[in-house]
Image: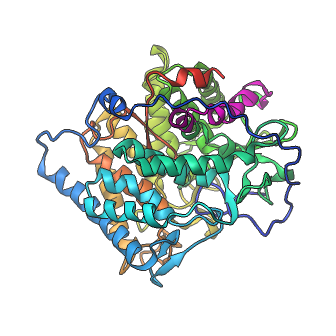
């Protein structure tokens, strides 16, 4: 089975085993670019709220908590800068850098992932340090195997967001240059991209070795839309929007078992390869990008909205269950058989369903808000039932177990954001103070169990109060976990949901009130 531990949603390749054939007969990308009409000043004037919020009076405790989270970000950044600047992640125990094999020779994943968080938290000096690295040392002419998904969500997403927040051209230019390098991955018979490509780009692309029969993964090819529409917007070249829209076109037509989307699709035939359905790893951000594509298009992308509504209906009908102890969870589905397990990754869904509920029809709105709150409560239980008050990688509802990991291999916590992400959305949409309390419990647990001398580290077992550290400060800890925690203790107008949509790595991209219409209709 393909599911196994990994830093991001998707997993590391294993030595090229089982690789699909490189794409052949590649057609060059159609270049019908027109000069971009994007006007940064006009865009800034169109925002409904100041990006970093107004400064209304607030209670001292909320402010103090926000400042604590800012201090954690500074600590994470300072240690990365001191011991690992230019590598992809910090190893906080051995005080050195980690490069990994997901980014095709690109470096500085933590710099790019941290940029917008530093900016939002008003860590001005640190933001300038990060910017300087991008200007002077961020090299795009590199060799290696790159995951299309990871490069897109972290690098393209981080650069685009920072451009929109600051108007600094260097971020836009790097995003566009990198975007061009990703296009060969789409040279397949269906236009559904393969998961990996080789840089410098040669037209070669392939799928994860372990992904069934050279198939592409739903959460990978379905998590491009937000960034690629912005690449078209800023470059004037529709090719990015066209490439990303292919996935929605293929998926809206293919027959779905009981309305569900399996996780593996052949980029050659456009048919499903296996019937494994999950709202956690391998499926997760595909669903997230459906509702967010619609929101980002200023509610014009009706195809994405319909796909989201239909998918959620099927998920509710077939996967949403209640445990004996009354906890609502979303099970996984393997060819019709339920696996009563929820991954930490699946915990983003509380926030997603709440966000969608806002825009559901009158009769569904309260029902979806209740569902979102129940799922978020279950994810909180997975934290509350552990000794560290941090949640495991996966928890189960079988053999008498409720919201706890039952396998040794699922007890770890790698600084993931999904649970605090849902707290942030639920707080913004309900203002129930329990979400801030739960977020603060996470801050305390991170400080107690994950903070080490030179940064933050994941832990190998959440059920022991003397956990072993994994010696890795993931870049998404700075991009997502700390950003969502910080926003939880901000006023709602900081990166307001009226103006911004967060990509799946928590990089804010603006809602587009005018220009996407053309791209979406391609
Ligand atoms: C991040 O890279 C993104 O949130 C992705 O969608 C899922 N995995 C990690 C964080 O857990």
Residue 219, x across and y down, in percent: 65, 45
- Looking at this view, name the residue that lies furthest to the bottom: 94
Q: Is 451 placed left or right of 289 in the picture?
A: left
Q: Is residue 460 above or below residue 496?
A: below
In the picture, the quarter occupied by the C terminus is top right
Provide the residue span drawn in magenta.
229-257
Q: Quadrant of the N terminus?
A: bottom right
Q: Residue at x 84, y 65 (%)?
A: 17
Q: Residue 122, position in %: x, y?
A: 25, 54
Q: What is the magenta segment's predominant secondary structure? A: helix
User: In the image shown, does 27 or 480 lie closer to the viewer?
Assistant: 27
Please state if 21 lies on the left or on the right of 514 as rendered: right
* Residue situated in front as seen by the camera: 232 or 83: 232
234 inside magenta stretch = yes
- Residue 478's image quarter? bottom left
Evaluate whether residue 282 shows in this view: no
- Of 303 and 310, nearer the camera is 303
Extreme front residue here? 35
Percent of width and height locating residue 273: 84, 43
The answer to whether 382 is drawn above or below residue 32 in the figure is below
Q: Is residue 205 magenta?
A: no
The answer to which of 496 and 434 lies nearer the viewer is 496
Q: Residue 145 location, x and y as percent? A: 71, 63
Whether 32 is drawn above or below 299: the answer is below
Give the residue drawn at x 66%, y 28%: 314
């Amino acid at each position: 089975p393909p599911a196994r531990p990994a830093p991001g949603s998707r997993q590391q390749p294993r030595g090229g085993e089982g690789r699909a054939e490189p794409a052949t007969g590649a057609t060059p990308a159609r270049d019908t670019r027109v000069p971009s009409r994007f006007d940064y000043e006009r865009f800034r004037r169109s925002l409904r709220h100041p990006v970093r919020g107004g400064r209304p009076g607030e209670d001292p405790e909320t402010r103090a908590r926000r400042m604590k989270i800012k201090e954690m970000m500074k600590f994470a950044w300072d240690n990365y800068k001191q011991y690992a600047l230019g590598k992809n992640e910090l190893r906080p125990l051995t005080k050195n850098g980690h490069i990994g094999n997901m980014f095709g020779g690109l470096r500085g994943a933590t710099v790019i992932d941290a940029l917008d968080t530093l900016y939002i938290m008003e860590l001005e000096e640190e933001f300038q340090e990060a910017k300087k690295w991008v200007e002077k040392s961020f090299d795009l002419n590199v060799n290696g195997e790159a995951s299309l998904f990871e490069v897109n969500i972290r690098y393209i997403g981080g650069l685009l967001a920072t451009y929109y927040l600051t108007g600094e051209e260097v971020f836009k230019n790097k995003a566009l240059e990198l975007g061009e390098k990703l296009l060969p991955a789409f040279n397949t018979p269906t236009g559904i991209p393969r998961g990996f490509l080789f840089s410098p780009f040669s037209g070669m692309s392939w799928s994860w070795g372990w992904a069934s029969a050279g198939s592409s993964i739903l959460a990978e090819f379905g998590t491009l839309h937000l960034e690629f529409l912005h690449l078209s917007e800023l470059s004037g070249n529709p090719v990015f929007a066209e490439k990303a829209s292919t996935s929605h076109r293929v998926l809206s037509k293919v027959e779905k078992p009981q309305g569900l989307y399996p996780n593996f699709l052949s980029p050659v035939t456009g048919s499903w390869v296996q019937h494994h359905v999950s709202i956690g790893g391998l499926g997760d951000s595909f669903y997230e990008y459906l509702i967010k594509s619609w929101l980002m298009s200023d509610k014009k992308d009706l195809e994405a909205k319909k796909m989201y509504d239909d998918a959620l209906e099927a998920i509710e009908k077939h996967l949403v269950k209640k445990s004996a102890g009354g906890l609502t969870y979303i099970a996984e589905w393997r060819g019709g058989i339920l696996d009563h397990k929820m991954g930490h990754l699946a915990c983003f869904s509380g926030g997603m369903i709440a966000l969608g509920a806002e825009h559901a029809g009158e009769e569904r709105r309260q029902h979806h808000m209740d569902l979102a709150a129940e799922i978020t409560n279950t994810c909180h239980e997975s934290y509350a039932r552990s000794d560290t008050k941090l949640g495991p990688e996966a928890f189960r509802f079988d053999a008498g177990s409720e919201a706890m990991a039952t396998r040794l291999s699922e007890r770890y916590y790698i600084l993931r954001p999904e649970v605090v992400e849902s707290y942030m959305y639920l707080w913004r949409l309900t203002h129930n103070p329990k979400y801030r309390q739960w977020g603060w419990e996470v801050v305390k647990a991170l400080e107690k169990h994950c903070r080490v001398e030179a940064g933050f580290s994941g832990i190998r077992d959440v059920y022991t109060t003397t956990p072993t550290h994994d010696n890795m400060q993931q870049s998404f800890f700075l991009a997502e976990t700390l950003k969502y925690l910080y926003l939880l203790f901000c006023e709602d107008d900081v990166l307001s949901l009226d103006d911004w949509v967060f990509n799946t790595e928590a990089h804010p991209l603006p809602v587009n009130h005018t220009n996407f219409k053309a791209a979406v209709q391609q």
